[in-house]
Image: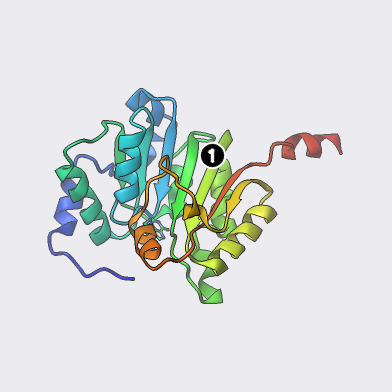
Amino acid sequence: MRMRKLPWAEEYVKTASIVEQQPQNWAGKWKERFSSDSLHVEIGSGKGDYWLLMANKYPQSIWIGIEKDINVSAIAIRKYDQAMIKSSNMCFIQKDAETIEQWFAQGEIDVLHLNFSDPWPKKRAHKKRLSHASFIERYKYIVSEQGEIQMKTDNADLFEFSLLQFQEGNWFLHEISVDYRRNEHPEDAITEYEQRFLSLHQPIYRAVWKKFPYQNKDKKKR
Ligand code: SAM
């Protein structure tokens, strides 16, 4: 869903101190910059609820939100600006994640979050899905060997597609649920879209992938 244009968005996002305009300058240095050894990155942060709530829940970790839409980003940043309590380990990147591998060094990210990514239902647009093989290849480079990717969605087609893409990319399916919120998960914040689907009593699909632990060893043996 496209959000209406906000006349104040561009100036606001350009001048907000939480926004990193040159993320490529920090590749390999994020942990040093924030004096933390745990880096979480969310792609497609939308209006920022998850990014803000999780950063407050886990303030020792770094939380970087990435969002390409400038109007939606402006809302997220305004929420951050107006929040009474906020972690000092936060940063926002208002850009398209298609060049994400330039913003992080090899193995720098510990947890990558994909929450309710756009489903792009038409086949010819599948390459824009954040779980398309071309994105998964980039994630393989920037996620650490012990790191993981966590995904939540309401969309069964996107979920099935993602399972196959990660499988083909040789990732290890560590956790899977087809009704994640049937049980309480106080450790994991609810996103704006998630709240909407929960109100409609729709199931939430969730998976966690890790880098396949035996992948490199097996290849060497053969
Ligand atoms: N994660 C939020 C939630 O769960 O409420 C927002 C979900 S919304 C359906 C998906 C968001 O991902 C949109 O705001 C869209 O602009 C953003 N997005 C999609 N592709 C992106 C990309 N390549 N880089 C950065 N953001 C992207």
The answer to whether residue 22 of the structure is visible from this angle is: no
Residue 25 rendering spot, x and y as whole percentages: 36, 36
Residue sitting at x 54%, y 34%: 107
Is residue 28 toward the left or the right of residue 123 in the image?
left
Q: Is 189 drawn above or below residue 135 in the view shown?
A: above
Q: Is 116 drawn above or below residue 149 in the view shown?
A: below
Residue sitting at x 12%, y 59%: 8
The quarter of the image holding the N terminus is bottom left
The answer to whether residue 188 of the structure is visible from this angle is: yes
Name of the residue lying farthest toward the front = 183
Which kind of residue does numbered mark 1 sit on? Val
Residue sitting at x 30%, y 60%: 69
- Here the colouring is rainbow
The quarter of the image holding the C terminus is top right
Residue labelled 1 has its Cβ within 8 Å of some atom of ligand 1: no
Residue 100 rendering spot, x and y as whole percentages: 45, 47
Reading the image, the residue beneath label 1 is 143
Q: Secondary structure at mark 1?
A: strand
Give 158 or 2, whichever is nearer the viewer: 158
Residue 201: quadrant of the picture: bottom left
Residue 183 rendering spot, x and y as whole percentages: 49, 49
Give 9 or 204, whichever is nearer the viewer: 204
